Amino acid sequence: MTNSPSSPVVLTNEEIMGLLPHRYPFALVDRVVEYEPGKSATGIKNVTINEPHFQGHFPGRPLMPGVLIVEAMAQVGGLIVKQIPDLPKGLFVFAGIDSVRFRRPVVPGDQLLINCELISIKRQRFGKVKGEAKVDGNLVCSGELMFSLVD
């Protein structure tokens, strides 16, 4: 892990790829700036016009699809669940969402600051995290995300 006074980066993109299975074009976390393994994480997603979904969502008025905002939150949450001590090794997948709300559009040029905190782990197979995504300090999305260990 990288952490120096001159750089707020705690996990680089390469380190994130070592923890999560996602790859282009579905790797939605560019870096992690705060991280307490098994407890909480804050990640950054830089939103750029070069992302393929903007070709059709929407021409002339590009908006980041809400499902991709939620997926970015789930990837930050996955970093937490992946590092919980004493959990079985394996693939934790996104299993559900509760109470998700979208507050404002996310557009190219925005930087999503995504904060997730562990709520619970059940039977060493199921995890739940609370997530929030903000742009310029304004809440754009929040909700609870569930994960399940697949065999």
Image (cartoon, rainbow, N blue to C red):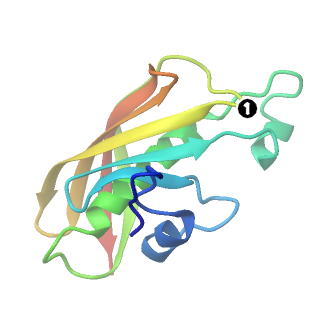
Vertical order, 76 against 110 (above or below) = below
Q: Position of residue 114 (x, y in %)?
A: 43, 39
Q: Residue at x 18, y 75 (%)?
A: 87
Q: Residue at x 47, y 36 (%)?
A: 113
87 lies left or right of 54: left
- From the viewer's perspective, is residue 145 above or below residue 16? above
Count residues near mark 1 (Cα–Cα under 10 Å), then give few for <14, some for 14-19, many for 20+: some
- Is residue 66 among the parts visible in the rendering? no
Q: Residue furthest front?
A: 6
Location of the C terminus by quadrant is: bottom left
- Percent coordinates x, y for residue 80 in the rendering: 29, 59
> Looking at the image, can residue 107 be seen?
yes
Relative height, residue 140 to residue 31 (above, below) = above
Q: Nearer the viewer, residue 28 or 109?
A: 109
Query: How far from the left and from the top, in percent, is residue 124?
Result: 14, 70
The percent position of residue 42, horizontal first and vertical second, equals 37, 45
Give the residue drawn at x 21%, y 61%.
38
Name the residue beneath numbered marker 1: 108
Tell me the kind of residue under disc 1.
Pro
Image quadrant where residue 63 sits: top right
Q: Under tag 1, what secondary structure?
A: loop
